[in-house]
Every structure is written in structure tokens, then in C-alpha cells.
Amino acid sequence: MTMPAAVVALSPVADLTLSGDTYFTLRDADPILPDAESMKEWSSAYAKPSEQRIPYASPVYGNFSKGFPPTLIEVGTKEVRLSDSVRLYQAPDQSHIPVKLDVYEGMPHVFQFYLYDTPESKIAISKMNDFLKEYLK
């Protein structure tokens, strides 16, 4: 299977082990996602705990040095998966792959969908559109 021309990730689930700090520091801030215990059940439904660090299940553990498409990651500051997004940004960035991390103040998980009529969502969707136009010529 060939790589896509570009990737857009909205509040991505990038670490099924839930080891990022924001699962704890923002646990009461995210109005969309439940507590980490409930999310552990989701992670276990996706992959056995012994397989949750496999890069296909948790891309933050992947090796991006062999190539990856340009990537846009959008996330809010009020969501428990914020650390997943930051860590997912760092991996391709260290491999010199075009990657952009847009963080939106006060926004929860997948705000572009849940809060679609807010100024932040409109900006995020516009940036997503511009990003895709650039790479999907």
C-alpha cells in the first residue's frame, strides 16, 4: 500500500498506553472524553496491552525516518490527548518530515466537529483546507 499524499489528524489517538502527562493534568478539563480508566478499556479493545506500543497501534512509537507524508495535527488545550499530539508532532519533525502542530486555546477533543460554529473551528477547518490544497494538487 502506498503512502497517502498528506495526513490530517484531529485530536489523534497516538498512544494507546495513555502514558502522556495530559491524561492526568487535563483529566477534569476535557468535557468530551471520559477518565483515563474508561479510555484504557477502549485501548484494550483495540489492542492487547502487550501490543499497545506497536507503532501501527500507537504511532508515537514509530520510526518516521524512512518517510512519511506531510502532516497537519490539530488539537485543543483542554483535551486529555494533547500530549499524544505533541509527541506525534515530534517524531516526524525530528526526521525532517513536513509536519505542523496547531494548538487551539480552550478547545476540547475534536472541537472542529463538536463546536463547529466557533471561530476556532472555522479557523481550524480553513487551515485544514489550505493544507490539503497545498499537498493534494
Image: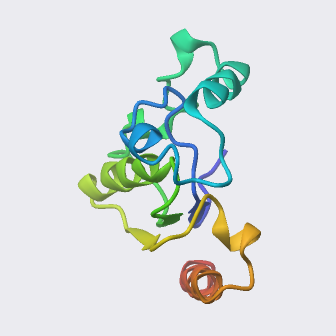
Q: Identify the image quadrant of the C terminus.
A: bottom right
Q: Given the current orientation, which residue lies at the most extreme top position?
A: 50
Q: Identify the image quadrant of the N terminus.
A: top right
Q: Indicate the position of residue 100 as horizontal and vertical percent values.
A: 40, 70
> Which residue occupies 63% across, 13% down?
48
Q: What count of labels does the image hold?
A: 0
Q: Indicate the position of residue 131 as horizontal and vertical percent values.
A: 54, 81
From where the camera sits, is residue 62 visible? no
> Which residue occupies 68% across, 72% down?
112
Vertical comparison of 29 with 44: above or below:
below
Vertical comparison of 88 with 19: above or below:
below
Residue 137 versus residue 41: which sits nearer the camera? 41
Quarter-of-image position of residue 116: bottom right
Vertical comparison of 51 with 83: above or below:
above
> Which residue occupies 37% across, 68% down?
98
Q: Indicate the position of residue 133 as horizontal and vertical percent values.
A: 61, 86
From where the camera sits, is residue 95 visible? yes
Q: Indicate the position of residue 24 as horizontal and vertical percent values.
A: 42, 37
Q: Is residue 101 left or right of residue 34?
A: left
Quarter-of-image position of residue 120: bottom right
Quarter-of-image position of residue 77: bottom left
Residue 129 versus residue 3: which sits nearer the camera? 129
Vertical comparison of 55 with 117: above or below:
above
